[in-house]
Amino acid sequence: MISIDLDRKKGLAILYLSRTETLNAMDHRFIDEFRRNLLILRRDPDLRVLMIASRSQKAFSTGVDLSILTRFSSTIEARKFALDMERLMEEIFDFPHPTISLVDGYALGGGFGIALSTDIIILSKGARIGFPAVKIGAVLPAGCTYRLIARAGAGRARELLLSGRIIDGEEAYGYGLGEFLVDSGKLMDKGMEVASMLLEGSPFALSLQKSIANALLGEVVRIMSYQSADSFAFLTTTPDWKSRIESKIQEMKQKGGG
């Protein structure tokens, strides 16, 4: 099964998260395919706007695939995986053209970190957003943490990061985690409307304006990404790492009837 597929229109590319059997949970292949497609799109001279959406109405992305977290052979491997996630989000954030994300269903942890890395987030009222990393004994990528702070403010971001609670699309919109809020069935229509507005701008001016707007936050994230990866790697050695993750996997299986 492919993890990513593309739909191209005039000046617009829609990158679909397509690992629907796992609700777009991120594993090594998912991250590699995503980054490879971003590289291809960066080289497209006709591209003006990138949209990121999901093939599943159940989830945008549920974050890291928990099944891989108990299989790291060393802290070096765990740190590399964490840095690969950081690089993915950085490459979305630094993409040379405007980016839009369409968020419906579950968008958890690094899964919503993908959306936070885009310029414009369109939320559905059916979105379910949360950052449950602490509940499984992990930490989020720095890119996710600091972009959440930039949007929601430090106080609200801390509450969401430390509680791990899940909020709906309307609450997320109220916290500044999206520019638009629509019914689930109107998500793509709104995305196309916003893309059309962006396509009216000068491609050179849009690219330069985005670079200026992102410069300071991008520098902070780049500095802190190594500390975040080191923290993630350290946590894989702690006594409750495996038990917390396995407990969460069992909980998910029971909820899914598996």
Image: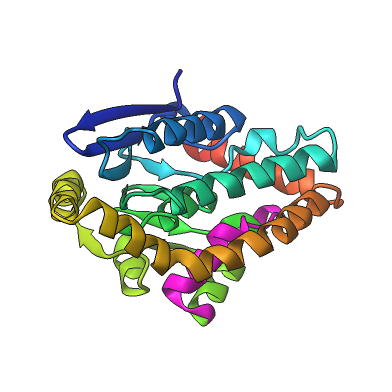
Q: Position of residue 16 (x, y in %)?
A: 34, 34
Which residue does the image show at 60% across and 49% down from the upper left?
86
Residue 256 in picture, x, y percent from top left: 48, 35
Going 62% across and 57% down the picture, which residue do you hit?
140
> Is residue 112 visible in this depiction of the protein?
no
Q: Position of residue 42 (x, y in %)?
A: 40, 38
In the rendered image, which quarter is residue 209 located in?
bottom left
Magenta span: predominant SS is helix
Q: Which residues are magenta?
A: 135-154
Is 149 colored magenta in this rendering?
A: yes
Q: Would residue 7 be found to the left or right of residue 200 on screen?
A: right
Q: Is residue 213 above or below residue 125?
A: below
Q: Quadrant of residue 72?
A: top right
- The residue lying toward the viewer, choosing from 59 and 76, is 76
Residue 126 screen position, x and y as percent:
29, 53
Q: Nearer the viewer, residue 195 or 77?
A: 195
Q: Is residue 131 magenta?
A: no
| Residue 252 shows up from this direction | yes
Judging from the image, the colouring scheme is rainbow
Q: In the displayed orientation, state which residue is furthest to the front.
A: 204
Left or right position of 242 against 61:
right
Identify the residue shown where x is 45% and y is 54%.
93
Query: Foreground: 91 or 179?
Result: 91
